[in-house]
Amino acid sequence: MTEEHHYISHKTMINLLNDLSPFKHAYIYGFFVVFLTPLVIGSKFTHYQGITPFTQSMELASDRIKVLSDSVMLYFVLIFSTIILTYLMKGLSKKVVKEFKLAAKNPDRLNHTVGENPKRTIFITALILILINIGWVLFFGFTSAGNSRIMRSFLDGSEFFIIINIFLGFSLNFYLLIYSLLMMEGRKHVVFLR
């Protein structure tokens, strides 16, 4: 009879995300609504100036790109604050916490040292990931860098390429947010060897 081993995996990340959302896969469904709606009806906006300072400074962008940029940025700010507040106020369910505790008891875990204070190292790494999210929001939401030389050359390119980059920017920052919460929760339960 083989003993089942538990690991922290992508399923744990999805369970963590579902635990912090109003209903199952709420943020993913919301993203597709927020992402696809401006692409479908964005051409109906004429002379759209933008909401965020970054979008307002994007002189070369089409109205569709401006609407997409604003909607994705505002949606990320909404879900970032919702996820962080839910995590801090409510925490995680017993089912998700149990996954972390079972992974900590896994006999196959790596037997190596992580440094003087591994919990502090993980905490600092998780904070850096959250700061990357905040920096992304501050730069692409609240600066006027949309008219910089780099952004002007970027906006001269294909609209499809710009849409893909907005999608990737959101997706990667969303992943970093969930991964940082996974690290924060993991440091509470994982036992490190010295």
Image: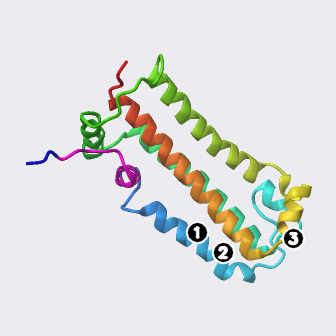
Q: Is residue 57 visible?
A: no
Which portion, as a residue range, is magenta?
4-18
From the image, tell me which residue sits under label 1.
34
Compared across the picture, whether 138 is left or right of 102 comes to: right
Q: Quadrant of residue 18?
A: bottom left
Residue 85 percent across, percent down from the top left: 48, 42
The residue sitting at 69% across, 70% down in the picture is: 163
Secondary structure under tag 2 reads: helix
From the image, tell me which residue sits under label 3.
156
Question: Counting residues from the N terminus, which is met first, the one under dot 1 or under dot 3?
Answer: 1
Secondary structure under tag 3 reads: loop
Outermost right residue? 149
Would you say the magenta stretch is mainly helix, strand or loop? Answer: helix
The residue sitting at 56% across, 33% down in the picture is: 127
Whether the magenta-drawn stretch holds residue 164 is answered as no
Q: Nearer the viewer, residue 99 or 16?
A: 99
The residue sitting at 55% across, 53% down in the picture is: 174
Q: Which mark is residue 38?
A: 2
Question: Alpha-carbon neighbours of circle 3 within 10 Å: few (<14), some, or many (≥20)?
Answer: few
Residue 77 percent across, percent down from the top left: 61, 51
Quick check: 25 above or below 185? Answer: below
